[in-house]
Image: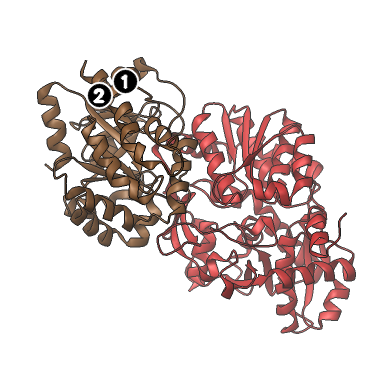
Chain colours: A red, B brown
Amino acid sequence: MSSTIDFNQYPDNSGHFGPYGGRFVSETLMHALDELEANYARLKADPELQAEFDRDLAHYVGRPSPLYHAERWSRETGGAQIYLKREDLNHTGAHKINNTIGQALLAKYSGKTRIIAETGAGQHGVASATVCARLGLECHVYMGEEDVRRQALNVYRMKLLGATVHPVSSGSRTLKDAMNEAMRDWVTNVDNTFYIIGTCAGPHPYPELVRNFQSVIGREARTQCLEMTGKLPDALVACVGGGSNAIGLFHPMLGDESVAMYGVEAGGHGVETGEHAAPLTVGVPGVLHGNRTYLMEDEDGQIIETHSVSAGLDYPGVGPEHAWLKDQGRVEYVTIDDDEALVAFRKLTQIEGIMPALESSHALAYAEKLAATMSPEQIVLVNLSGRGDKDILTVAEIDGITV
Amino acid sequence: MNRIGKKLQALKDDGRKALVTYIVAGDPTPETTVPAMHALVAAGADILEIGVPFSDPMAEGPVIQLAHERALKHGTSLRDTLNMVAEFRQQDADTPVILMGYANPIEKMGYDGFATAAKSAGVDGVLTVDLPPEEASEFTDVLRAQQLENIFLIAPTTTIERQRAIASQAGGFIYYVSLKGVTGAGHLDIASVEQKLTEIRSLTELPICVGFGIKDGATAKAASAPASGAVVGSAIVSAMANAEDGKYDSIPTIISDIVSEIRASLDS
């Protein structure tokens, strides 16, 4: 089925990926989205902005990020060769910065002086605060109280960078509530404010523009894999919360039919317990945060609380393009639970000397399972989307250690 | 013409302004809602707007967010909300009732199932905050088939093209959001309201009610002067929230005090 689809044609003109995506927001936000869409349409072809983006990615972020052959881990796994796309080596330690630089430049070229952002694990908040510090923009980050507690280090990093962190005490006090609060801020301060959404969800055109800024991951990985091995990878694996690192890796290779793709959702305590964050695996389509996508909801259509050991995956929705890719059968979505992710976290740290983020550890755990079923001449390429320094306190707490 | 149109026409004929009041179903408890609805009518509300609790009320300010959270603590669902309207209808056959909420609970029930249930409960109109005209046409058709009005917001930032798209689907009245921001925010700029209302009137015959930022009789009178009526929400909801825990019997009196003052001001 996928061979007949031109994946570059999506979203369509009204911002939909098949039945998903769209723009489900209050009339009070419509003008801001229209303005953003118009600015993006004008600026994405602007050579000056593009040159500045490329320059920043090279000299500020440190791109291209390496593609690393995890030889020892591959050997121990005894199956396919595992390659890691080292987004953890980016400035600020995760893939998030690719998108924040892109959107902050859009803000700058659109004449907006105040930036707002939501954050879960804190990586997007840190990336936003970082770019704002550099561009001299005022930065406000909304973060659920529960995440503020779990990610104290990142909260302090944001403050050091000059951002104001607003703890959000409504609802489940996590990412989704931070996103609600950021939307409210945007509605109120729309004249001078640019909302940098951190994932490929939200109302059109956010899923498209986040994907486009993150697609640098997949473009580089494709070229690097060809250069290093002479062929394309057999499989791509990436974790999916909102799904921005995954769509960034997948999108440039969607047309490469030989490349299988796996999006790994957070299985939490196990999908059967109901305590997880796996809307693509067990959710149903609905409307949240401005787009139609797969959601975790109860029988009354209320969004339910999610659980994952990793704050960055703790989200009840997912980017609408993933919802569509699932229905098309182009990407397979699977789950890895907390315990499996923690095992992968320790394993990569001990075998390769690379400490992955707990989010990325979900992808690593699945990649290991997958590689074990494949042959040594095959290639599994994993997006190592972030580094694990931010999670040390969480892991220590699980180990019963006070650092 | 359903109850909304008749009521607004009658008020117009009398030279009076419509008072539209908002409370959230199940806030602070499910038992308080129907008595509160009757108290609103007794104190002078013309149209009742009932918020359907949602876990992620993105367009609401803090006051109404908290009301949604209180209602959800008791598990008040869309179905429960419809039951409350049905119970209200047993004693009040005339006052128009509008549901205001978010798309997801309605989609969960299904458009057809919802419209049928809403009609039979005695609902007259629906305002779905996150269903703009681009995404609403199917829902509008389903509502129309049940003689239910799809009510839309128009904001200060809504362009003339969008106003036209909204007018083509809108029924009942246009809800004009008098200021930028969330519910319960900021203060009102009456001159800009007047200017925008003139623009809207060139596109639709529907009456216009003005809401967001109306706190008392004085602001209600000022905002409704160029319009058909005023919508009051956060002021009522926050007063109700001040009722002491367990002393919810005082809610009808609290409502009566606020709404009577606004009614008197509108009629003065």
Q: Which mark is residue B217?
A: 1
Vertical comparison of A10 with A24: above or below = below
Total labels: the figure holds 2
Q: Which mark is residue B263?
A: 2
What percent of the width, then of the height, locates residue B134?
35, 46
Q: Nearer the viewer, residue B60 or B256?
A: B256
Q: Residue at x 39, y 38 (%)?
A: A27
Vertical comparison of A327 with A12: above or below = below
What percent of the width, then of the height, locates residue B162?
33, 36
Tag 2: amino acid: Arg
Quadrant for residue A389, please give it.
bottom right
Vertical comparison of A271 with A41: above or below = below
What percent of the width, then of the height, locates residue B122?
19, 50
Q: Residues within 10 Å of mark 1 (few under 14, many from 20)?
A: many
In what element is the residue under mark 1?
helix
Q: Is residue A290 visible?
A: yes
The quadrant of the image that shows the C terminus of chain B is top left
What percent of the width, then of the height, locates residue A292?
45, 56
Tag 1: amino acid: Gly
Q: Residues within 10 Å of mark 2 (few under 14, many from 20)?
A: many
Q: Chain of mark 1?
A: B
Q: Residue at x 30, y 18 (%)?
A: B194
Q: Tell me: A258 left or right of A67.
A: left
Q: Is residue A381 visible?
A: no
The quadrant of the image that shows the N terminus of chain B is top left
Cβ atoms under marks 1 and 2 closer than 8 Å: yes
In what element is the residue under mark 2?
helix
Q: Tell me: A176 left or right of A352.
A: left
Q: Chain of mark 2?
A: B
Q: CA distance from mark 1 to mark 2?
A: 7 Å
Q: Tell me: A387 left or right of B92.
A: right
Q: Nearer the viewer, residue A14 or B85?
A: B85
